[in-house]
Image (spheres, helix red, strand yellow):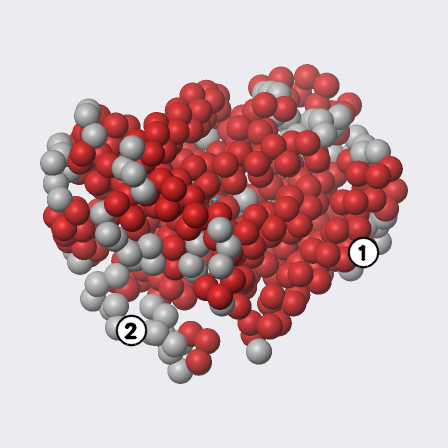
Amino acid sequence: MTQSVTSAAASGAASSASGATSPKRAFWSSRMAFILAATGSAVGLGNIWKFPYITGENGGGAFVLVYLLCIAIVGIPIMMAEVLIGRRGGRSPVSSMGILCQRDKLHARWRWLAGIGVLASFLILSFYSVIGGWALSYVGTAGTGQLSGQSSESIGAIFSGLLADPGTLLIWHTLFMALTMLVVARGLRGGLERAVTILMPALFVLLLLLVGYAMTTGYFGQAVTFLFQPDFSKLSTEGILVALGHAFFTLSLGMGVMMAYGSYLPKGVSIARTSILVSVMDTGVALLAGLAIFPLVFANGLEPGAGPGLIFQTLPLAFAQMPFGSLFGTLFFVLLVFAAWTSAISLLEPLVEWLEERRGLNRMISTLGAGIAAWLLGIGSILSLNEWSGFAPLGMFAAFEGKTIFDLLDFLTANILLPLCGLLVAVFVGWFMARQALENELSMGGRSFALWYGVLRYVTPIAVAIVFIYNLL
Ligand code: PFF
């Protein structure tokens, strides 16, 4: 969390601005640093790997529309609420919640809301690292020229070969987790901030380039229709739940990450404007990824609903065919790894902070403990791609029928824990915190405040609750 904070932490500016918060706490070196770190957390595999494949699985346009609605009426209001809790509490998520409860004389049990988030981030990290490992392995595949000139079939075979090989998957998963633990244990601070400043825009440019290439395939129009022309007959109710869950996942909500980052945001910076900007950038990257991938899917007669392997079977095709494809391919996967890395760091950090605070462990031990535990759980996800692909641990319940460990972790976090935590955040901030405190913290004008407050109190919780209950039944 602290990677981008100024070293002038104790300069007094921090303590005077923070009011009741700990005088030792640092702040982001600038509003931009917060935006970059929050975007670094938000933009990750969720945008480039997950968004295209779940869009494909859920029929396209109608799903995208529901997803955009979820970002607007659920995601942005909750992101503002989380950043607000963090800035007002000024500590780690669980402690910030504790401070707010004390100040507003609310039941301390509300702290558990942040506890659910910590659990979710741990579970997500376990499989996130496995997919991060796929991206790492593709840096090697593209870098050694294995993609150039390949056909769609052989590219498909490279991917299925990877999934079928638990040993190789384990190596890449281990490497990815080790990289994540390294940063969290040592805190690359300035280095990471500088890297995000360069690599995020680079990723954006490269995605634009890929969209440019996709335009030359002759199937761009079909992809645009697929992504933006809603056909509600293709959208199931589970699809709506997936869209909602993904809005949380992609914006890093429901996990306390934005609370933790918000705790470093200087007073006076607009929470609303900042949250909207981060959300728009995040959504932009996802849509660009869709526009880069689907023309290739249609041009090569691939199946949009191919599942988690979609980007690994489509983008390499572009790299196989375009001039300097190996170079662009390598660069792309390096950037994807980087995007995944900054997100994984933000997934590990809450648990490490929690272990330090609650259990009094030092940072190194906390990082090792949390990282190794997530790594172990990740092995379950690896095996569910091959040896255990027929093993559905909760298969006796209809809702989990046929779901492997990997599917189950994904479903449980994105579709249950994150929306649940988000719902609690909306209820806590919308119904329990003092309105005056919210107005002060947001320093927002009458109408915009009323809009946010109304949406957060009524629309957000009702929308989340309906989708949730409907799916449970
Ligand atoms: N938002 C990240 C992505 O879209 O890949 C994933 C993620 C990171 C989720 C951090 C949650 C989180 F706390």
- Where does label 1 land, which residue? 431
Q: On screen, 100 above or below 325?
A: below
Instruction: Indicate which disc, 2 or 1, sits on the residue closer to the N terminus.
Output: 2
Residue at image position (52%, 62%) is: 232
Relative image position of residue 192 (x, y in whole percent): 44, 26
Quarter of the N terminus within the rendering? top right
Callout 1: helix, strand or loop? helix
- Viewer-proximal residue, 98 or 343? 343
Q: On screen, 56 above or below 83?
A: below
Q: Which residue lies furthest to the bottom in this view?
A: 396
- Viewer-proximal residue, 45 or 54? 54
For this view, does 404 lie left or right of residue 424? Answer: left
Residue at image position (38%, 45%) is: 223
Residue at image position (43%, 60%) is: 58
Amino acid type assigned to the residue bearing label 2 in the image: Phe
Relative image position of residue 438 (x, y in whole percent): 81, 42
Query: Residue 21 is drawn in which quadrant?
Result: top right
For this view, does 408 lie left or right of residue 246? Answer: left
Q: Dot 2 surroundings within 10 Å: few (below 14), some, or many (20 or more)?
A: some
- Viewer-proximal residue, 426 or 277? 277
Callout 2: helix, strand or loop? loop
Q: On screen, 104 above or below 29?
A: below
For this view, does 35 lie left or right of residue 143? Answer: right
- Mark 2 and mark 1: Cα distance apart in space: 43 Å
Residue 291 in view of the camera: yes
- Viewer-proximal residue, 271 or 325? 325
Q: Dot 1 surroundings within 10 Å: few (below 14), some, or many (20 or more)?
A: some
- Where does label 2 land, which residue? 391
Amino acid type assigned to the residue bearing label 1 in the image: Trp
